[in-house]
Image: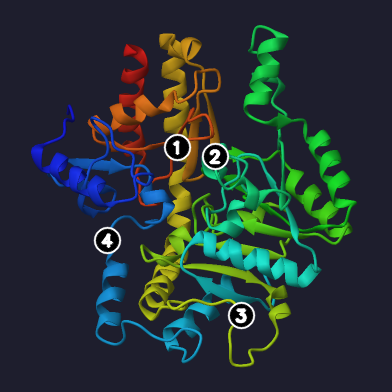
Amino acid sequence: MDYKFSPQTKSLLDRLQAVECPDTTYVSENFPIVFRKSSGVFVEDIDRRKYLDFTSCFGVVALGHGPSVVKRAIKKQAKKLIHGMGDVHPTEEKIKLLELLAKISPYASPKIHLGLSGGDSIETALKTAMLATKRHRFLSFAGGYHGLQFGPLTLSARPVFIDGFESWIQGKCISLPFPWQNDELLESFDSFEQQELFLNQNQFLRPENVLELLESHLKTKSFAAIVVEPIQGRGGKREFPPHFLSQCARLCHQYGTLVILDEIYTGFGRTGVLFAQESLGFLPDLMCVGKALGGGFPLSACIGEILDVWGKSQGEARHTQTFLGHPFACHVAYENIREISRRLSHFQSKIPAIENEFLNFEKDCKQDGIYAKYPFCFRGKGFMKGLWFYSQREAFCVPMMEYLLAKGFLVLPEGERADVLSLTPPLVILPEHFRSLFKTIFHYLKTI
């Protein structure tokens, strides 16, 4: 399947570029495709080519494209109510969703604030932390991604996102190095200089040194909260060392700093459990969710017991928007979450077979000599995985993404150096789908 733009696709992309902000959609000679329709784990483009989706559209379509539970919910709600007045006259759909989120959350008596995007929920969490602590600065980790609105943007350290906005960001957040403890991988480099370059390129530091640095900042008692993903999504599926985040949480609470857990990507079964928080060993002060929450509709939520700090409404909500608690999105989300919860044990049962496909791919690459030329390691958990080509040039995974697209696979490169191939398929994916993908990746690595 060799992909070339058809006249129809080229015409549509030309029309797009004529009217869209030029910084939004990347267009090259053979990228992107134009979506036409989708079903299950497959997407079809405008030229009726079919693609196996290993992105689930940024982790959103957890149950696959167009699942029957979502279609039924859309049909039912379309007959009742399309739009409401979220912060004035509530709908039953909004109330039921909030009750469900409260029930499945890790908190005893949480309050919840809805939004439209993951960035919205982070914005809510930042403002809540400021109200609760009377502080105005924040902490985050290198490689983290929490949204691009002005509030969440202050948490970012990636030049591609903050270039031109430094004057707004300056002084609002400190980005900590990412904790690193894989000595075996580090020793695979030939010289000390190569090791140092590797650590600096990835903003790595020993866990104990990161904790020392964290405490030195916390002692100033000027930080409202630290914001952290259980597994970094766009950062390249980076996992923290065991117990590291619980140690961070202990230090933060010792100095009066809150912990905001960004489960926007990891939530609702993505890592093999309902929330990645379950295995962290501590309860965050606030938890942000989104992406898979809405079942394809734009919806997010900030959850926690300290949301009471906002106080009771006096008739004018201080943090709201026109589409807050949109009844259509709330009803779809309610049914979507129930279905994910109902089928979670089935999704979990597939993980060992999927993990085996990763191991078989690694074995084949080692036997053929590919691994020696392009060494890699696996990152992530459950249905949130990545192949990290840690010793390769920057943007190594970009041509691989384009090659895989031409062969009928939707994937994305990740990490600041684009050296991670991200695999976040719908939870309904099958092991044989991974086998097909790995066979194609093997052929690519063998021929470049």
Q: Mark 4 is on which residue type?
A: Gly
Q: Mark 2 is on which residue type?
A: Lys
The part of the image, by quadrant, that contains residue 354 is top left
Q: Position of residue 14 (x, y in %)?
A: 19, 43
Q: Where is residue 323 in the image (x, y as percent from the top left)?
A: 42, 76
Mark closer to the observer (3, 4): 3
Q: Quadrant of the C terminus?
A: top left
- In the picture of the structure, the residue carrying the numbered disc 1 is 422
Mark closer to the observer (1, 3): 3
Name the foreground residue: 78 vs 140: 140
Q: Position of residue 392 (x, y in %)?
A: 50, 18
Residue shown at 62% from the left, 40% from the top: 239
User: Spatial distance from mark 1 to mark 3, Cα to Cα?
Assistant: 38 Å
Provide the secondary structure element on which disc 4 rests.
loop
Provide the secondary structure element on which disc 3 rests.
loop
Q: Mark 1 is on which residue type?
A: Ser
| Residue 180 shows in this picture | no
Q: In this view, does 68 lie to the left or right of 391?
A: left
Relative to 45, is 376 above or below?
above
